[in-house]
Amino acid sequence: MIGRIAAAIRSVLHLCYEFYILQAVLLLLSSAVGGLVVWWRSGEISAKISKGDLLAVIAAEFLGLLIGIAIFLSWRQRVNSDFKAVTTSENILDGKLQSTECQIIQLQQRENRRASVQGGFRVFAEECSRCDVLIFEYLFFRSGGLERVPRQDIEMARTHITTNVENILRDLASILTFETGHPCATSVKLLERQADVAPSDWPVQTVARDPNSRAARPLIAPLPPNRVKDNSANVHIILNGFDHYCSDDLMALQKLVQYNNSYGNFYQHYNATMVVPIPMFAKTEDPVLIHGLLCADNLSGGLANDTCKRYMQQFAYRLTAMYHRIDRLAAR
């Protein structure tokens, strides 16, 4: 596009250049012809006008000749300067375009490397979580069950688990706030499995929040928990099996009847969200192999991207180990 504009400018300047050359040539020719006529008919003219008037006519013709030469030289210099400016501008633009293309390629390569590294961290987080589960099983169940574990040890373990969950949510909220540039809140929602109820009607209860959002958005214990089918993110992940749900404008989706939330005033606290499942490693016939959902949200957006999703998945695997412990310790 820029090359076409530069070519059009060059064409216009060429036309101007040729036009002023033609004008200067015509002026030179007219001056020369006028001088020849005056010289050729000088005898006849001198009989009718005085010698001083004749000299004035010749001087006028000579002055016109000089003016024509001056116009020609002036416009030639100006057009050449314009040509140089256009060429320089085009070269600068070409250079900038090439530089921008190089920067785009470098950014793409950097993003690909970043995605690869973060993907590797997600796998690493999964493996660490699996190891954590195995170590926990060995430490607490190697001697035949929780019955032989002192009660104070179990209570201490539960306290540490609660603290770890809070730290995980705090750190994730801090990372997402930095990544998006907007204050983010994080929370955990757990499924309450019921054997005689369809998964779409299972209750989903918010059980933990990051410290900052917990003060402004306390856990809604007095209200009944919503069901899986009452929230679009729940349905998308728990029933339809997707690995995440995200949007940077939930109110727009709600207006299009593409988002459902049983809490009608959600927009007072957030309008963007990213939700991922908290995987479950237990060997079971349960059709839904997740503990619950890890949720992040804010009012301004910036969450609906792969970078935030990868961060969420890494932290979700850390929560897997925590909620595996909670489930196993619940027997005592």
Image (cartoon, rainbow, N blue to C red):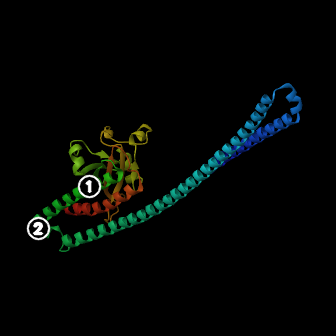
* 299 lies left or right of 220: right
Q: Which mark is nearer the camera, 2 or 1?
A: 1
Q: Which residue is drawn at 23% across and 58% down?
A: 167
Looking at the image, residue 53 lies above or below residue 122: above
Q: Which residue lies furthest to the front in this view?
A: 51
Assign a secondary structure to mark 2. loop
Residue 323: image location, x then y, percent? 25, 60
**Do we see residue 124 in this rendering?**
yes
Residue 15: image location, x then y, percent? 72, 43
* 176 lies left or right of 99: left
Q: Which amino acid does label 1 sit on?
A: Leu
Assign a secondary structure to mark 1. helix
Q: Count residues near mark 2 (Cα–Cα under 10 Å), then give few for <14, some for 14-19, many for 20+.
A: few
Q: Earlier in the sequence, mark 2 or mark 1?
A: 2
Looking at the image, residue 39 lies above or below residue 107: above
Q: Residue at x 34, y 48 (%)?
A: 228
- Say which residue label 1 marks: 169
Q: What residue type is labelled 2?
A: Pro
Q: Quarter-wise, where is residue 283 in the image? A: bottom left
Q: Do the residues labelled 2 and 1 touch (CB within 8 Å)?
A: no
* 303 lies left or right of 143: right
Q: Count residues near mark 1 (Cα–Cα under 10 Å), then give few for <14, some for 14-19, many for 20+.
A: many
Residue 178: image location, x then y, percent? 32, 53
Looking at the image, residue 77 lies above or below residue 143: above
> Which label was assigned to residue 150?
2
| Image quadrant containing the C terminus | bottom left
* 329 lies left or right of 69: left
Q: Quarter-wise, where is residue 169 in the image? A: bottom left
Q: Which of 308 and 259 is in front in this view?
A: 308
**Do we see residue 193 in this rendering?**
no
Q: Nearer the viewer, residue 35 or 83?
A: 35
Q: Which residue is drawn at 42% across and 41% down?
A: 253
